[in-house]
Amino acid sequence: MILRRRTAVYAAVLLFFACFLPACRQHPKSQTRLFRFIDGLDPRGVIDSPFLKGERKTSDETVYPISSTPATDASTGENPLGLKRKLSIGPTSFNLLFAPARSEYDYNVELPQNGVMEFGIGIIRDRNSETLGPGKRDDQAGVDFSVLLETGGRKKALFQKRLKLPPQRESRTLNFSQERIVLPAHSPKARITLLTAGSKDCFAFWANPILYDRGRKPANVILVSLDTLRADHLKTYGYDRETSPAIDSLGRDGTVFLNAYAPAPWTLPSHVSLLTSLNDVRHQVYLREQSLGPDLKTLADFLRSNGYYCAAVTGGAFVSPSFGFAKGFDSFDIAGAEMKAPDVAAQCFQSVDRWLDANADKGFFLFVHTYQLHSPYHSPPPYNTKFTGENAARSSFDVLEDLGGPMGVFKPLSEADRMNIIGLYDGEIRYTDESLIKPLVEKLVHMDLYDRTMLIVTSDHGEQFYEHGSWNHGNFLYGDVLKVPLIIKFPGGKFRGRNVPSIVRLIDVMPTVLQEMGTAFAESDLDGRSLLPVLEGKEKTDREFLSDVADMWIRASSSDEPQRIALNSQGLKVILNREYPKDYLAGLFAPPPPFQSVEAYDLSRDPLEKNNIASEKADLVRSLTAQVLDLYRNAKRMGTARTKSKEIEDQLRALGYIK
């Protein structure tokens, strides 16, 4: 078988997010324990609420804040009265307990030895809240927030604060405060009450309140995705240019997987696979109108259930909450308002830097993503000329705009022009290396987090520089877009200095993290497998990958069937291609390379995939083709959601995906 079928305000808001649930008993080595009040609320704990009194109907979404949805994170459990929600405000999405006055939520808890309680409190004023309080509002309208602690029959107030109703504007306004309480000495049993009182027509909320032991020193996880990074443009993968000193150094301190394959040649489906360990045929996200299904469990879902505080800092667009990526994360922040800014990697690190300052005392999972390497190639000086020279004809290049849009991806350029463009791309790598990876490592070392952090650097796909007659990515399945870097630095220096030559997959990252962090999961539910057996010498053969693409430009079929499929077996890589529609071919500025329905390449002898030997390996190709067709017919598809957002359309237009 080719695969196993087991088939300002915004900145303040970013600082408080959290996650919960006790460490999984099946894996006692996990050291994290964090109680998330959102997850812990059940119907018995809702002592008072306007919803209980019949003042508001849970079936009416207008009684909740706009841009909020019921929480679907795997460990949130039952959602009484729809009070557990995710809210998006500007570039940030976070979890909240909706608590319009008067609301009272009770919890029986055990206080940790070095206990800290963190939470945000807020009042949001929007179109929905105004319908509950029409007419002139009292200038003193507001909500009193209280945290009460009861131990040994005695009750006292740990926290009290009043927030006034924010001013009315055409857009939403928010009054928010981030809070932190050091809890009294350890008590085996306690009751904590979250109480709001005041103006009934105020949309008040608790922003992801958590309780944790700041004295624990658990292992952490940071997963970095450098969008559009080819493995073969890094020194540690044999490149002749000094594009990546910080990444190379990290590789020497960890394990370098020399042949890691992505499941798709573009951002959206590949990241869904990275964070769910499912191939495209399982998660069914093929087109830009589709998003991660709410029933899929993400890496953040699993780690959250094991007591990890889960957050993300991404470049947005195809890696944003609109496509379902906030699932499992307590906070999801989009770093860098301008998608085409030449310094988005530096902006990304600034957000990561602030986040680490605020959350270093928790056991955490942090997902980091940047579009710095994505077209346009225009890194800040001196990086934009580092590999081109001062007198290069091009000082920047936008793959789509400079070729006339998506219909120009097959347009040939001179060899000198091609090398100029590659030099600009390499400058982007060096800039990202020095503005994101280097300061991130230095920050972790400075904070004494580096040695106990599992730090992973990878990419979702590579980039084409006309090696096979095409630019950009998202249309072909050759190694220049499917082979991605994968470097894993394990806690405590485990597996340091390893280079793994066998083929692995991007879908293997998630189960590797889960096993290393002692988080229970059913391997039969995933397409990927942990890489620890490879590193322990128990597995030495190539793993079989499956990659496919339903070309986003030509809309291959209404059923979202792949336009191309790639797979490997016994050292052979096979690519199955469908014919281009005639109307698509008619609109191209330059024709695509000659069409071949079946391609086969000996990866050991022909790593650049130049010599098609499909006719020489006819029997093996026929067998693999039959297997893959059977797989697509019988795969357990998980389903997708649909996405539509004006903000996302603007971001995709900035990246060149929409004209």
Image (cartoon, helix red, strand yellow):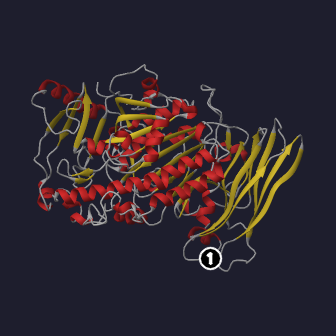
The amino acid type found where label 1 is placed reads Gln
The answer to whether residue 112 is left or right of residue 617 is right
The answer to whether 549 is drawn above or below residue 384 in the figure is: above
**Which residue sits at x=30%, y=59%?**
388
CA neighbours of label 1 inside 10 A, class few (<14), some (14 to 19), many (20+) = some
Whole-percent x, y for residue 141 in the image: 73, 72
Residue farthest to the front?
Answer: 390
The image quarter containing residue 411 is: bottom left
Residue 79 showing in the rendered view: no
Q: Is residue 36 visible?
A: yes
Q: Measuring 39% from the left and 51% from the top, which residue is drawn there?
A: 227
Q: Nearer the viewer, residue 379 or 271?
A: 379
Question: Residue 344 placed where, x, y %?
Answer: 45, 61
- Outermost residue, bottom side: 136
Q: Which residue is under mark 1?
A: 168
The image quarter containing residue 92 is bottom right
Front-most of residues 550 and 116: 116
Percent of width and height locating residue 284 = 34, 43
Q: From the viewer's side, name the closer residue of 547 and 440.
A: 440
Q: Is residue 128 above or below residue 472?
A: below
- Badge 1 marks a residue whose secondary structure is loop
Residue 310: horizontal and vertical position, in percent? 57, 46
Q: Quadrant of the N terminus?
A: top left
Q: From the viewer's perspective, is 246 left or right of 258?
A: right
**Quadrant of the image for the C terminus?**
bottom left
